[in-house]
Image (spheres, rainbow, N blue to C red):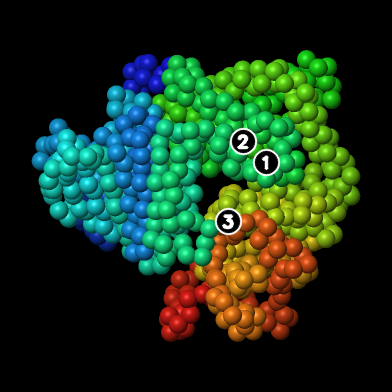
Amino acid sequence: MASDRDLFGTGGPARKPKPDKAGPAKTPAKTPAKSAGTPNEAGYTAASIEVLEGLEPVRRRPGMYIGGTDETALHHLFAEVIDNSMDEAVAGHATFIEVHLDAEGWLTVTDNGRGIPIDPHPKYPKKSALEVIMTVLHAGGKFDSGAYQTSGGLHGVGISVVNALSERLEVEVARGQMLYRQVFEQGHVKSKLETVGKVLNRRGTRVRFKPDAEIFGKTARFKPARIFRMSRSKAYLFGGVEIRWSCTPELVAGSEIPAEAVFHFPGGLKDYLAQDIEGKEQVVEQAFTGKVEKPGGHGSLEWAVSWLTQDDGFVHSYCNTIPTADGGTHEAGLRMALLRGLKDHAERINQTKRFSNVTSDDVMATCAALISVFIREPEFQGQNKGRLMTVEASKIVENTVRDAFDHWLASAPTTANKLIDWTIERSEERLRRRAEKDVARKTATRKLRLPGKLADCSNSNSDNSELFIVEGDSAGGSAKQARDRATQAVLPLRGKILNVASATRDKLSGNQQIGDLVLALGCGTGSHYKEDDLRYDKIIIMTDADVDGAHIASLLITFFYRQMPKLIDQGHLYLAVPPLYKLTQGSKSAYARNDAHKDELIRTLFTGRGKVEMSRFKGLGEMLPAQLKETTMDPRKRTLLKVVIQPEDREETSSSVERLMGNKPEARFAFIQERATFAAEKELVDI
């Protein structure tokens, strides 16, 4: 195990990449040669062995490098590019980063760092270091601890993967008062490195790229709001950098996203948390914040924590400015530090007995927390770096935060006692809810270990309770703030769930999202379905009002149809109808479900003088909680579509599900061919 000094900086030798655990391939035992092979053997020769060179493996299997080809994967390309610029800033070589998105789909990231080296590479003397970095996997400056003390990982594949998956990528490097340029297309060199000319007041790297439609689809586009938020979060994570955002004005017309903005937050996570919980009532007046340089020797650790009175908590964690959406060892260290700090304070004020039933879940239930670590050679789970796996980080975070938390509690006894009481109340409330549940609900709960992302309702009876199934953590966060906590529960699912109509039993049983959904409902599947054990009266599928949202809804309906048909028969399944547009004229405003509804409202409702301002919602996560509540979640105002299967339509329904969702792609292909003209004429199919 590495020492603390090795983990957080350059105190020891650089850790060498681990060899493949599988070891060298074993030479097969010799067998007597045959005069003539079988037909199968004759067709399997050396010519059958395909060798993929350069970046071709990335284009063949993009999911192995960026997790897929969906919207999340598309925006991961931007993350890889800006992370390189952030590494320059964190290392002290860059002071600003510019991000620009244009109407044609080009994204440009510029920094004033050292600039990618352009001299010949020692291993490839006929190529510049720039070309090697852009075209060779596992080539980069982060393996050498002398180049970067902390960075976003040691994979060395980020920018080359972006190059491979881009229709065109252009790089400009300003070094030594000279400007150099090179162009790539689909990962291949389009032009050799050229010297553009002399520049006096410029240095650093500019990467301009456009994702390849062959990989991501012709309609795939960067979402300005998402790029805007990602850029802003980077500025919060490192106060020493200024990030300048801009985009073509027409891309954000009618939205709350500005066409130009400058992000610079010297306060770091303290400012970030204040912005996240603005307007929300807090248990304690002052947030618990802190920053420690070189914990354990090198690197840095920063945190900001508060507790909310009326809202569910959240934890957003980062490692070397990279968001770790799935948590990891640094989050585990934070949880333990807070729990043990409160437990020790409870002992000091003779509250040990009352505190004995408190768990880390009680402490974190309404805790709004941000934590950012900068460590040397971090170990992530997967190329998307969604989870930090560096074991030593847990201990260092726990010890560092724990010391600061103890001092914070001791310096403000009134605040500390208030927080102790609040945490104990959360524990007692949890135990009381468990005790007050009726027999059927008790039985279901005893069998269940509820999924961690489920924000359950406090209603002890399934009558009048609702479960909203939403796509993604962003939409889930908005829905949790908009819900009625007494009767409405929220379960975020990440992306598209498994298509159960074509999946094997092993895939079905091993799928985490389906497992979470089954656990949340508590009623079992198939022949084990029990109506009395269903934990909610209404199951509401709430997805974005676009094609991807319709696809996710279709997959969820297929799941319920195949695995819980009685749930549909008993009238429990619904579809939410979120708006696609908001129309405003003076003091008058209304929401439209789709284009047809929009046109109808303009004709019938907005008949007065004055321009009708129109904004289009790009997703549930971009709606304000108040808007989501007003339009989609409030039972007094919302519209729900009930999923019903008429007895006379059961045979046709079964045939349609098998044809469109089953394991025969030729049936889906025939369906698409039959409706090709219709698909071309209509961009969005209403559910």
Is 22 on the left or on the right of 492, as rendered?
Answer: left
Which amino acid type is marked by label 3?
Answer: Gly
In the picture shown, does residue 434 fall above or below 582? above
Which is more N-terminal, label 3 or label 1? Answer: 1
Q: Is residue 531 left or right of residue 23?
A: right
Tell me the element at label 2: strand
**Going 34% across and 64% down the picture, which residue do you hit?**
104
**Cβ atoms under marks 2 and 3 closer than 8 Å:** no
Tag shown at residue 313: 1
Residue occupying the point 72% across, 68% down:
638
Residue drawn at x 72%, y 80% is: 646
Q: CA distance from mark 2 to mark 1?
A: 8 Å
Q: Which mark is residue 640?
A: none
Q: What is the CA distance from the residue labelled 1 to the residue labelled 3?
A: 17 Å
Q: CA distance from mark 2 to mark 3?
A: 20 Å
Q: Position of residue 36 (x, y in %)?
A: 21, 56
The total number of labels drawn is: 3
* Residue occupied by mark 2: 369
Q: Considering the numbered disc 3 on the image, is that residue within a helix, a strand or a loop?
A: helix
First along the sequence among labels 2 and 3: 2
Q: Nearer the viewer, residue 525 or 442?
A: 442
Estimate how packed mark 1 is, as few (under 14), some (14 to 19) or many (20 or more) residues with alpha carbons within 10 Å.
some
Q: Say whether residue 45 is visible.
A: no
Specify the farthest residue to the front.
609
Q: Who's the residue at 62% across and 83% down the image?
A: 607
Q: Secondary structure at mark 1?
A: loop
Q: Amino acid at mark 1?
A: Gly
Graded by Cα atoms within 10 Å as few (under 14), some (14 to 19) or many (20 or more), the crowding at tag 3 reads many
Residue that carries the numbered disc 3 in the rendered image: 621
Asked whether the residues under the numbered discs 2 and 1 touch, taking CB atoms below 8 Å apart as contact, a structural biologist would say yes
